Image (tube, grey):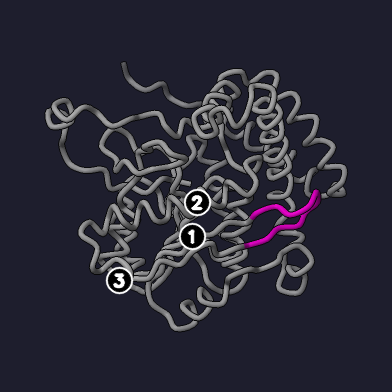
Amino acid sequence: MPKRRRSRTLDYLVYLAVRGVVAVCQRLPIRVCYRLADALAVLAYRLDRRHRLVALDNLARAYGDALDPPARQRLVRDVYRHFCWMIMEMLQIPRRLHLTTWRERITLRGHERVLDRLLDGGPLVLVTGHYGNWEMAGYLFGLFGFPTHTVYRPLDNPYLDRFLREFRGRTGQRLIPKDGASEQMVAVMERGEVISALADQDAGPKGLFVDFFGRPASTFKAIALLAIQYDAPVVVGAARRIGDHFRYEVVCEEMIEPVQWRDQPDPVRWITQRYTYALERLIQRDPTQYLWLHRRWKHQPQPRGARSRAMSAPSGQITPA
């Protein structure tokens, strides 16, 4: 069936509506935005049954009997609240985070080695997950003069897509469209610049299965492959909310150096498992800030016979942001 043609008029009207909401929220006091976010979170929890059930199932897989059903439900409500707050904060970031004001909102931890590497130059891979406020972390790097390149899936609405690119590009963040991303990522590495990646989504049946919360999780190989090919350190970090206001801790959880994987019998698996464990440690500190709404364990390893019949080219894509 041919793809239905989009209405450019409807796309533009949706774009205008989104711009209007963004403009209003950016001018409201942050405490008012939080109250709006609380109301949206309650509504989303009640109406978004599909993702609510996914989150409850994920928590059962990750924590087992350590969380009883009522505790899982409370945690999922908190997840919706956190991400509604995060959206409001994302809209406020361009107005509230500047070189003269970022210390009012951000605390850095474990950043010294990363800063040394950035100042010395050379390719670097930044890894995070759908945890805390991943947009804030990217914005902060650009604010400090170290723009990152992130793979993303362009929005179907071209007006909204342009708005997103402009919003994220205000401090030098650069978006690489998913289609044809490989060549651009190679160019970034060869120039000695920074690739950032969200590394916590299911990579399909051909992904590399590593342990995540005690269960095999399909994970993309491209991060490890890029790091090995260009001798680039892999930095695992996140922007984690601290307290109950617009305050975050930007933390480097682990920095994986090339010297650590050179003698490993399977360096791709070793790197992938290492950064996955680091992401798990971050999530464990505050599970309410993780996006449990996506199906992280959607695919599981196939039996050996079925896997060999289905095997083709290995997955090498980076999860689009």
Residue at (79%, 44%) from the top-left corner?
25
C-alpha separation, residue under disc 1 versus residue under disc 2:
7 Å
Residue 228 falls left or right of residue 17: left
Q: Which residues are magenta?
A: 240-250
The answer to which of marks 1 and 2 sits earlier in the sequence is 1
Residue for point 43% across, 42% down: 212
Give the image quarter of residue 144. Answer: bottom right
Which residue has dot 3 on it?
231
Q: Amino acid at mark 2?
A: Leu
Looking at numbered disc 3 in the image, what kind of residue is underneath it? Answer: Asp
Q: Earlier in the sequence, mark 3 or mark 1?
A: 3
Q: For the residues carrying marks 2 and 3, which lies nearer the camera in this image?
A: 2
The image shows residue 187, relative to residue 240, as above or below, that is below
| C-alpha distance separating marks 2 and 3 | 21 Å
Query: Could you tell me residue 317's position as x and y percent?
Result: 32, 47
With 315 as the anchor, is 19 left or right in this view? right
Report the amino acid beneath label 1: Val
- The residue that disc 2 covers is 279
Residue 201, quarter of the rendered image: top left
Q: Residue furthest top?
A: 1
Compared with 142, 42 (above or below) is: above
Tell me the residue that label 1 is attached to.
236
Q: Position of residue 205 (x, y in %)?
A: 28, 32
Classify the position of the N terminus by image quarter. top left
Q: Using a 10 Å C-alpha cutoff, classify the residue at mark 3 as few (fewer than 14 neighbours), some (14 to 19) or many (20 or more).
A: some
Whole-percent x, y for residue 167 in the image: 61, 54
For numbered disc 2, what is the local secondary structure?
helix
The residue sitting at 73% across, 49% down in the picture is 89
Disc 2, disc 3: CB below 8 Å?
A: no
